[in-house]
Image (cartoon, rainbow, N blue to C red):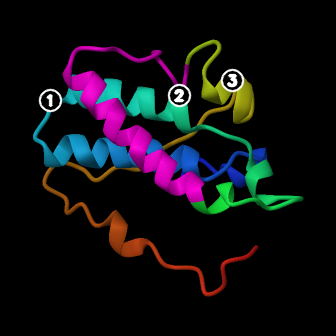
Amino acid sequence: MRAICLHEHKIDHVAHLGPSAAAGIGTLLGLDADTIYQAVGQALHTTTATRQSRKGEISSWKAFAPAFAGKMAVEAVDRAMRGEGAPAPIWEGADGVIAWLLGGFEAEYQVPLPGPGEAKRGILDSYTKEHSAE
């Protein structure tokens, strides 16, 4: 979320929710890295949407979109556990998410991850919005 700003590219935040939920579910289940990788790719591919659900005529989909991303993450993990692969590389590919939706083929993003032995405390840096509006 901190490394890849979806807002500036008019992509809905569920594009972060799907893959992160898949990664979390896979980690909680103790799955191997390749299975989680496949689940994350599937979840990103199926939950990336434009911000139109939050603009103009607002429908109930605005409220349903995050739950849908969670549902798709569960299904992605299930499929990956059964051996189904994902489009790869989903972010960096020639026709991947970065090339077509997040700045173009030349765009680069650095995603900070904790080092070996370093505490995984990213969730402690998150917060709830005071108002449910931009």
Q: Mark 3 Cα within 10 Å, few/some/many (few <14, many 20+)?
A: some
* Residue at image location 67% in from the left, 40% down from the top: 49
Can you identify the residue that label 3 sits on? 99
Q: Assign the magenta stretch its main secondary structure.
A: helix
Is 87 rendered above or below residue 77? above
Is 101 rendered above or below residue 29? above
**Residue furthest front as drawn:** 60
As rendered, which of 75 and 106 lies closer to the eye? Answer: 75
Can you identify the residue that label 1 sits on? 32
Does residue 130 show up?
yes
In the rendered image, residue 31, in percent from the top left (x then y), is placed at 14, 34
Label 3, label 1: how far apart the Cα atoms are: 28 Å
- Mark 2: which amino acid? His
* Residue at image location 47% in from the left, 18% down from the top: 89
In the rendered image, residue 74, in percent from the top left (x then y), is placed at 32, 41
* Residue at image location 35% in from the left, 31% down from the top: 76
